[in-house]
Image (tube, rainbow, N blue to C red):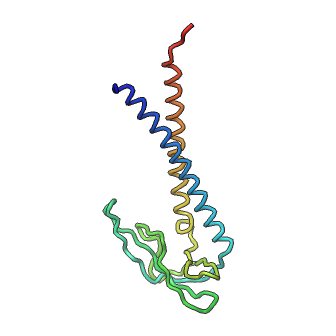
Amino acid sequence: MNPKSMLKKLLWITCRAWFVTGLCTLVVALGFGIYTSVFLIRSVPAKGTVVNLIPEYDEENDSTNYAPVFSFAAGDGKIYTIKSGVATNPPGFEVGQNVQVLYVPSHPANAKLASFRQLWFVTVLCVGLGVFFTTAGYFLLRFERRRNSLSIPVTS
């Protein structure tokens, strides 16, 4: 196989892989968006307090992110202490800070902090990656097709 045909094959695979990956990531983002929306519709607010910031070391970036741990009293009278799933650097909260908490009454142990970053981070990240890969794949597809249409010899 000559280098030109290998490059052509690589472009063919790459543009389709990026386009499909982007579309799949957008579908995942839609799923996360629906999940979060349903959570917001079913949840009730409560007042909470950040009781700790747990450091989480990120080896890839050689940095430490901080996940807030918050405590709140649910409608059933029990106190719940929960670690957030989103860690940031610098920390988005301070120990002792009063926060708004959202929880579904039937599952208070799955409560979340009522902040845009805590609720929508994964959805926004997936949308960004999905748009990037879909757009890049689309333009690579157009480039490949234009290149193929120009290289086809016309016979009469």
Q: Quadrant of residue 91?
A: bottom left
Out of 15 and 99, give the one closest to the viewer: 15
Question: To which quarter of the image does residue 110 belong?
Answer: bottom right
Q: Quadrant of residue 87?
A: bottom left
Looking at the rendered image, the quarter that the N terminus falls into is top left
Quadrant containing the C terminus in the rendered view = top right
Where does residue 23 sit, x and y in percent of width and height? 56, 48
In the figure, 78 relative to 12: above or below? below
Percent x, y of residue 43: 65, 76
Q: How many marks?
A: 0
Spot the residue most to the right: 41
Q: Up-down: is 91 above or below 33?
A: below
Give coordinates of residue 118: x percent, y percent.
53, 69
Residue lying at 48% horizontally and 43% vertically, measured from the top left? 18
Vertical placement of 142 versus 85: above or below?
Answer: above
Residue at far front of view: 1
Q: Residue 105 in the image: x percent, y percent?
A: 64, 82
Q: Residue at x 53, y 50 (%)?
A: 130
- Residue sitting at 61 percent across and 78 percent down? 103
Furthest residue to the top? 156
At 55% from the left and 53% from the top, the residue drawn is 127
